[in-house]
């Protein structure tokens, strides 16, 4: 009987190790096979038959003015805008309006497609005026992680609805959806990604709300930036009446923020964020090393992370953030101390204990003062859940009354410690269970052996 018990204990250990090996092997086999498969079989919105440029080609000489703009009303026509801009037409001095809501999640055949950013090279930006007419763009889940041809930036992969925009105006639209996959991305690369803009310079971004969530699962390097509205901006760029409700997640990054990660401006060409707010959560598990950049430009922020050279009193004014910010270095609003000779001016910023029942009144008082410089500053009203919102919030055609990070029913469960380590937890749990069952069997056999001997 002793030999039998010994064999059972040996079998228990062998089965425990075998169970562990099977579970781990299945996990890595599935993960590696998925990594080697091009998402959506490489289907892109830039494939023939899935973009439509007739809205531009047929009206080149008759439309494009402010009173008679180019009209985009379908997903194919919106993809056509990417086709036209990425072939060299920057739309400088021209006007585009949305005529309908745009759904980029699937084509007319019900298939998902990869989105290539509008303005996919830094030397081929979009430079026109884009008015969403308070329509909503439902973004695709899969973005192309584009490599720029510029020698200074070719090591960076960037992805967004719009890539590079310069000397342009964007206003009056919302974005919804979940961005979770980046074709061309891999561990060990540097990224600039956002739901809407990669890089904006000399641009006004006005009356725009992002409800879409974005998640970057790669172990990145360098100055990787992840944002709801824009990854980074150059000088003379303004965010006016902008809101982010989307949840931002990065497995690793240099910076992440609800509105913009890194912005810059000067006294002559100031940049600003005014009359804006963030509700979404911002999560970065690991901050990339500073490298050649100043360490104070790293971190996660509700509104921004770094605002370099913002030597102007309207740098950040009349903003609030209630989103949860989770990172090794976290800021409720942003970090005013960076490599700028003059610290960023932050005025009338509300968060934490500074948010009380007077928030709506304070926001409108400050908005009134801002209108002397920016007549387009919006009035605030009380939205659902006692949350102040811009007065135009409920003009969007796909309006829902829920106020919170992301779309109701669409908010993904972004990776937690458990979700990232489930193979090891499952392996350990299954192995312990097998071991305990066989151990109990051995104990029961020992008990019976004693009974027989007695």
Image (tube, rainbow, N blue to C red):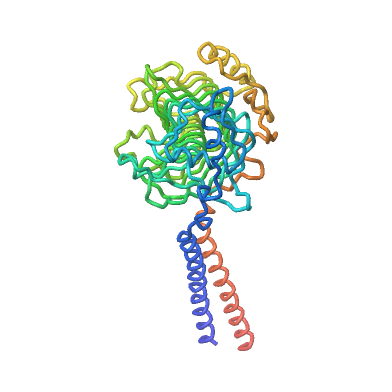
Q: Quadrant where the N terminus lies?
A: bottom right
- Name the residue nearer the viewer: 218 or 77: 77
- Name the residue nearer the viewer: 184 or 387: 184
- Residue 397 visible in this rendered orientation of the protein: yes
Q: Quadrant where the C terminus lies?
A: bottom right
Report x, y in % for residue 242.
55, 27
**Image: 409 above or below 316:** below
**Image: 178 above or below 21:** above
- Name the residue nearer the viewer: 13 or 183: 183
Report x, y in % for residue 17.
48, 72
Q: Is residue 382 found left or right of 84 in the rendered image?
A: right
Q: Is residue 150 found left or right of 238 in the rendered image?
A: left
Residue located 41% across and 43% down the image: 191
Report x, y in % for residue 372.
53, 11
Q: How many marks?
A: 0
- Residue 321 visible in this rendered orientation of the protein: no
């Amino acid at each position: 009987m002793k030999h039998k018990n010994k064999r059972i204990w040996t079998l228990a250990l062998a089965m425990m190790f075998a169970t562990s090996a099977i579970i781990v092997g299945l996990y890595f086999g599935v993960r590696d096979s998925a990594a080697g498969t091009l998402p959506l079989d490489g289907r892109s919105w830039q494939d023939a038959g899935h973009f439509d440029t007739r809205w531009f080609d047929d009206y080149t000489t008759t439309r494009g003015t402010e009173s008679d703009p180019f009209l985009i009303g379908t997903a194919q026509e919106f993809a056509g805008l990417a086709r036209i801009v990425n072939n060299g037409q920057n739309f400088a001095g021209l006007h585009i309006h949305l005529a309908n809501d745009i759904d980029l999640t699937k084509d007319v055949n019900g298939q998902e497609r990869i989105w290539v950013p509008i303005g996919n090279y830094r030397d081929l930006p979009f430079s026109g005026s884009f008015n969403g007419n308070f329509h909503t763009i439902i973004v695709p889940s899969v973005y192309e992680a584009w490599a720029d041809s510029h020698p200074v930036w070719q090591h960076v992969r960037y992805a967004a609805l719009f890539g590079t925009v310069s000397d342009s105006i964007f206003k009056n639209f919302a974005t919804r959806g979940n961005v979770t996959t980046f074709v061309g991305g891999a561990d060990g690369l540097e990224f600039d990604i956002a739901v809407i803009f990669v890089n904006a310079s000399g641009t006004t971004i006005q009356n725009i709300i992002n409800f879409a969530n974005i998640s970057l699962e790669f172990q990145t390097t360098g100055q990787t930036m992840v944002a709801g509205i824009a990854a980074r901006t150059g000088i003379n760029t303004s965010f006016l009446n902008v809101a982010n409700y989307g949840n931002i997640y990065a497995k690793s990054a240099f910076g992440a923020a609800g509105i913009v990660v890194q912005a810059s401006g000067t006294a002559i060409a100031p940049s600003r964020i005014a009359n804006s707010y963030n509700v979404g959560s911002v999560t970065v598990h690991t901050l990339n090393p500073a490298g050649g950049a100043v360490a104070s430009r790293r971190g996660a922020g509700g509104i921004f992370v770094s605002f370099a050279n913002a030597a102007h009193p309207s740098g950040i004014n009349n903003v609030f953030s209630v989103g949860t910010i989770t990172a090794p270095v976290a800021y409720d609003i942003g970090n005013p101390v960076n490599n700028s000779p003059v610290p960023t001016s932050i005025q009338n910023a509300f968060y934490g204990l500074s948010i009380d029942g007077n928030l709506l009144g304070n926001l409108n008082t400050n908005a009134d003062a801002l209108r002397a410089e920016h007549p387009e500053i919006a009035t605030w009203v009380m939205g659902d859940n006692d949350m102040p919102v811009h007065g135009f919030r409920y003009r969007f055609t796909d309006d829902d009354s829920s106020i919170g990070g992301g779309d109701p029913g669409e908010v993904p469960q972004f990776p937690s410690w458990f979700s990232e380590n489930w193979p090891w937890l499952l392996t350990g749990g299954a192995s312990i269970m097998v071991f305990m069952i066989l151990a109990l069997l051995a104990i029961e056999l020992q008990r019976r052996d004693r009974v027989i001997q007695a």
